[in-house]
Structures are given as C-alpha cells and as structure tokens.
Image (cartoon, rainbow, N blue to C red):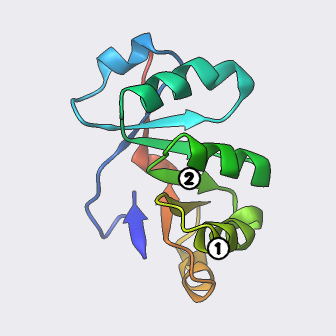
Amino acid sequence: MIFFGHRFIESKSFYHISSIEAIQNTPPSSTLYIEFSETNLDIITHTFLNSMPTAIFAQNITELLYASSFNASYIVVEKTLAKSAQNIADSYLFDAKILVMLENEDEIEEFALLGIDGIIFSNAIVKINS
C-alpha cells in the first residue's frame, strides 16, 4: 500500500491546480491534483498532451474510466467508491494507482484488506493559486 500525507511516512505532495497557468507555480516534475469535471477538461487535456504526472479525483465510475484514458498516474476516490474502483482498475489493467481519500488512520486496515493500492490524507494536497 502506498501512503501520501501520513504522519509517519515521508511522501511527495500533490499540487491542486484549477488552471493551466497555476502549473507555473508548482515545483518541476510535481504531481498535479485535478478534480475531474467538464470545466477542467482543458487542464486535464493539457497535462495529458504534455505527459505531466497527474492525480485525478473521480467521483464515479465513468469519471474513473475517463481519468484512466487521460493517463492519470493516480486516481483519487472517496471511500464509498474505493473497492469498485480498485476492481475496475485491476480488471482493465490500469497503469494508474487507486488512492482512497482518508481522514482517519483507523481506516487504513479496512482498505488494506480490500486491496486498495494506496491512501492519501488531505495534508498531502497543496492548493496552488494562479
């Protein structure tokens, strides 16, 4: 299991951007965090065309499939979608790792037993302004 933002384990940060211009305010080779939505398709397409590492937040199975099609490095999902997302990723051999957003360390074991690729805590996501 991969950990991002856990207090015991050093990890890289993800940089939450809301515009293409905001990319300039992130460190080189950083992983960009983008919420999947139709209004963010320009950002997602830009990162895809420029082979930038991305973590895309998907709220449902359709968005999960789109995120994979855009070559996301990570697909972040809520707890309720985690098991289904992992099953689909395993069935279709996604290159992306499935990360579940957690607030409480007590839930780690539950998601480890479900075979989820990794977890991410909110402190691993740095908000970047344009």
19 in relation to 100, above or below: above
Q: Position of residue 54 (x, y in %)?
A: 44, 40
Q: Quadrant of residue 88?
A: bottom right
Q: Is residue 112 above or below residue 76?
A: below
Q: Quadrant of the C terminus?
A: top left
Q: Position of residue 92 (x, y in %)?
A: 62, 67
Left or right: 39 with respect to 52? Answer: right
In the image, is 52 to the left or to the right of 106? left
Q: What distance separates the C-alpha of mark 1 from that of mark 2?
A: 15 Å
Residue that protrudes farthest toward the left in the picture: 28
Location of residue 101 with respect to 21 vertically, above or below: below
The structure residue drawn at horizontal position 63% and vertical position 24%, both measured from the top left corner, is: 41
In screen coordinates, is 61 left or right of 35? right
Are the two marked residues, 1 and 2, in contact with CB atoms closer than 8 angstroms? no
Q: Secondary structure at mark 2?
A: strand
Residue of label 1 = 91
Q: Look at 75% across and 63% down and name the residue there.
A: 81
Mark 1 is on which residue type? Ser
Where's residue 1, x and y in %?
Answer: 43, 76
Task: Pick whichever, 74 or 10, lies toward us.
Answer: 74
Amino acid type at circle 2 is Ile
Q: Which residue is mark 2?
A: 75
Considering only order in the chain, which callout, 2 or 1, is on the residue closer to the N terminus? 2
